[in-house]
Structure formats: structure tokens, C-alpha cells
Image: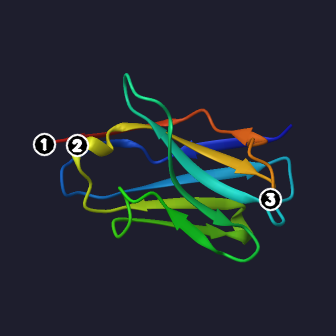
Amino acid sequence: QVQLVESGGGLVQAGGSLRLSCIVSGRTLRNDFMGWFRQAPGKEREFVAQINWSGGTTSYADSVKGRFTISRDAAKNTVYLQMNALKPEDTAVYYCTARTPGSGTPWGWGQGTQVTVSS
């Protein structure tokens, strides 16, 4: 059974940092794109960042560039999202996703982890 399990969310003050983790099990990652999305209350889910598992190429939403860093550890089958200089507008449920190249639909979603940034 394929599972994506996130952890690392929590409550932090504005300007603080958190690191989210997503462990993938039940499937061998090759050239997949691992990504993070987020959804704030009353808003649509939005893209945050992604990384190509094999080549390490990354991309970010403009709203998080320079503050968030996505990375992966192949030995641990884990993708991370380091979030620095957090702002109240970063408050959301963060989801880990996985998709194959050329597919617009992820083959996996995590259950989500809550990030709350207080002002």
C-alpha cells in the first residue's frame, strides 16, 4: 500500500521556522516529482514547491521563494520542506504529493499537517 505521511507541523510565531517531512512507503521513487501544496481556510489548495526525485530540480511558488527550501533524502525515502521567516499568511494545512512526469494528477497525497503562524 502506497503511503505518504507528513509530520513536522505546529504553531510558531511570525519569523520562526519549521521543517516538514514526508515519508513515502510502498513505492519506489524514480523520476517522480515530489511536491508540497497547502490549503488555508476558505481558500483553494495552492502549489508551494516541488522537487524532481532523480535530478533534484526544484521550483517554488513566488510567495515562498527565498524563504522555503524543498529537499529529499533518497536513503530515507523522505522529502522535506524547510520553512523560514514564516508569516501569518503561511498558515494552512500542508500536503505532500507525488506525481509521475507528464501527469498533471498526483498519484499520492498525504493526510496533511497543520502549520499555524501567529502574529
Please, which residue is most extreme toward the top here? 42
* Residue found at x 33% / y 65%: 67
Above or below, 79 against 3 in this view is below
Q: Give the structural element (helix, strand or loop) at label 2.
A: helix
Q: Residue at x 64, y 42 (%)?
A: 5
User: Is 25 positioned to the left or the right of 39 in the image?
Assistant: right
Which of the colour schemes (rainbow, by chain, secondary structure, one colour) is used?
rainbow
Identity of the amino acid at label 3? Pro
Helix, strand or loop at disc 3?
loop
Separation of marks 2 and 3 at Cα, in angstroms: 33 Å
**Residue occupying image coordinates x 79% and y 42%:** 107
Residue name at image x 40 percent, y 28 percent: 43
Q: Nearer the viewer, residue 92 or 78?
A: 92
Task: State the residue position of label 2.
Answer: 88
Which callout, 1 or 3, points at the residue further toward the start of the chain?
A: 3
The residue wearing badge 1 is 119
Q: Amino acid at mark 1?
A: Ser
How crowded pointer 1 is (Cα within 10 Å; few <14, some 14-19, many 20+) is rated as few
Q: Residues within 10 Å of mark 2 (few under 14, many from 20)?
A: some
What residue did someone put label 3 on? 101
Residue 42, image x, y percentages = 37, 22
Determine whether 84 is above or below 115 in the image: below
* Upstream in sequence: badge 2 or badge 3: 2
Q: CA distance from mark 1 to mark 2?
A: 6 Å
| Horizontal arrangement in the rendering, residue 81 relative to residue 73 (left or right) | left
Alpha carbon distance from label 1 to label 3: 38 Å
Tell me which numbered mark, 1 or 2, is placed earlier along the sequence: 2
